[in-house]
């Protein structure tokens, strides 16, 4: 059973109402007022039994995961509700260790696939090209 399915069942049981599709609602199933969201968030985190993080941290994590999933930046911007895509891309997303390792693996693969000639002739002299590819 997924967490979302469990959540929907809780809404049905506690609110005696059909879920609205919102993850966080009042006891009557209505949207949570912004000023009341943090206490609601904290209760849901405790109920779920997961590590306590702030709403801001959850938003940053969401943006980073969307980037790692190669979600188009404008779509990620809409999901995390930023006014500008630059906020999503430059401030909210972090580079994960796995993304860094993947980039380095791809770079190594590209470097090893590159063909290097073994010698060049210039003015009748044969020179090894390995010295031209100093790393």
Image: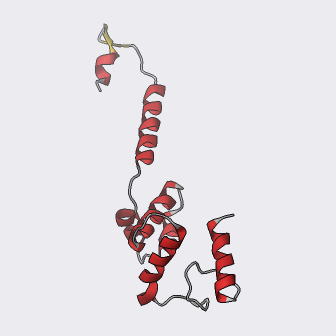
Identified at 58% across, 89% down, the residue is 27
- Residue 84, image x and y in percent? 40, 74
Task: Tell me which corner region of the image, top left, top right, bottom left or bottom right, holds residue 101.
Answer: top left
Task: Tell me which corner region of the image, top left, top right, bottom left or bottom right, holds residue 82.
Answer: bottom left
Can residue 19 be seen in this snapshot? no
13 vs 59: above or below = below
Looking at this view, is 123 or 26 the one in front? 26
Identified at 39% across, 71% down, the residue is 54
- Residue 74, image x and y in percent? 50, 68
Looking at this view, is 125 or 44 the one in front? 44
Figure colour scheme: secondary structure
110 vs 96: above or below = above
Q: Is residue 70 left or right of residue 130?
A: right
| Quarter of the image that includes the C terminus | top left
- Residue 91, image x and y in percent? 34, 65
Can residue 28 be seen in this snapshot? yes
Q: Is residue 31 left or right of residue 109?
A: right
135 vs 107: above or below = above
């Amino acid at each position: 059973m997924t967490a979302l399915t469990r959540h929907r069942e809780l809404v049905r049981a506690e609110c005696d109402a059909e879920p609205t599709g919102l993850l966080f609602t009042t006891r009557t199933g209505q949207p949570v007022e912004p000023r009341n969201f943090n206490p609601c968030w904290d209760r849901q985190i405790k109920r779920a039994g997961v590590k306590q993080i702030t709403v801001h941290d959850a938003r940053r994590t969401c943006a980073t995961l969307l980037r790692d999933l190669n979600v188009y930046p404008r779509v990620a911007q809409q999901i995390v509700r930023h006014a500008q895509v630059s906020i999503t891309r430059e401030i909210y997303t972090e580079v994960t260790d796995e993304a860094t390792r993947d980039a380095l693996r791809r770079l190594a693969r590209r470097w090893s696939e590159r063909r290097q000639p073994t010698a060049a002739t210039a003015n009748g002299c044969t020179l090894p090209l390995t010295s031209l590819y100093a790393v």
